[in-house]
Amino acid sequence: MVSSDTARVGILRRAKTPNIPPIIRYKDVRPVVNAFLSDNQRSVNLLVEAEEHFNQRADDPSISALRQDDARNSVEVLHAIQRMANSLTQFSFEPAPKRQAKLDLAGVEISVYADLIVTGTLRRAPHSGVAILRMTQADGESEAAQTRRREMGLYVATLARLHAEQNFDLSKPISNRFCMSIDVQHGECFQAPESNSRRMNDLENACRFIVAMWDSV
């Protein structure tokens, strides 16, 4: 969504013939973050215990350098989510179902996975949505990099809204305010904008581009 047309073709090629990564980054820290946010008390003990475990793994010479590096990055995630905990107190979280259908958009199946179900009050009425955790390394602090990160966050939040509507049977009305992308390392929570038709159209057009180009890449 934030790439040039030329870069998009390369992304499609890599998607069509993917390489299996040696490890899945942040696989082990993600459930810890989910458990912390789902805990009504937001007990830091969960984070402290997990940090000790990841520090031990980071210093373990018997495991690969990649897993050691992932452990160090996981500790950074734990510190980051603790720093942004206060900004998330207005929301209640619970773990999302492990099995989730793919999002069907303009003929393309999109692997969107919600980490958490979100609930809260809007204009004195209960509402709901879903949250997607984004764990990414910094790509610079320039104005262009920050704008790119913000746009990515808003597009992911829009996908969360579409995913909630299509694939979740929530007991409370879905609101854009509670459909979010949580950029953990950067401490930002992006909510689906109320005026969101442009981004929805952008996503649909990107899927049409995928359908048109898939057989030729």
Image: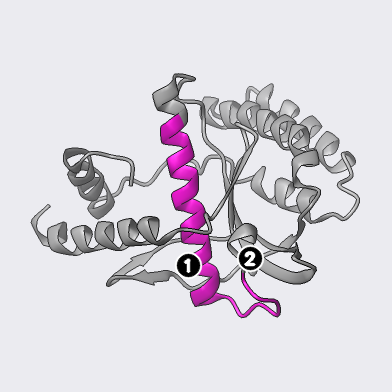
Identity of the amino acid at label 1? Leu
- Decide which of 139, 174 is in the foreground and name it: 174
Which numbered disc covers residue 129?
2
The image position of residue 193, as x and y in percent, is 52, 54
Residue drawn where x is 31% and y is 56% of the image: 202
Span of residues in magenta: 147-174
**Would residue 77 be seen by someone viewing this image from the given angle?**
yes
Which secondary structure, mark 1?
A: helix
Identity of the amino acid at label 2? Gly
Which numbered disc covers residue 47?
none
The image position of residue 67, as x and y in percent, is 57, 32
Residue 81 sits in which quadrant?
top right
The image position of residue 106, as x and y in percent, is 29, 70
Residue drawn where x is 53% and y is 55% of the image: 192
**Would residue 115 be seen by someone viewing this image from the given angle?**
no
In the image, is residue 5 part of the stretch drawn in magenta? Answer: no
Callout 1: few (<14), some (14-19), or many (20+) C-alpha neighbours within 10 Å? many
In the image, is residue 164 part of the stretch drawn in magenta? Answer: yes
Which secondary structure, mark 2?
A: strand
Identify whether 64 is placed above or below 170.
Answer: above
Q: Which residue is mark 1?
A: 162
The image position of residue 8, as x and y in percent, is 22, 44
Residue drawn where x is 52% and y is 64% of the image: 161
N-terminal of the pair, mark 1 or mark 2, is: 2
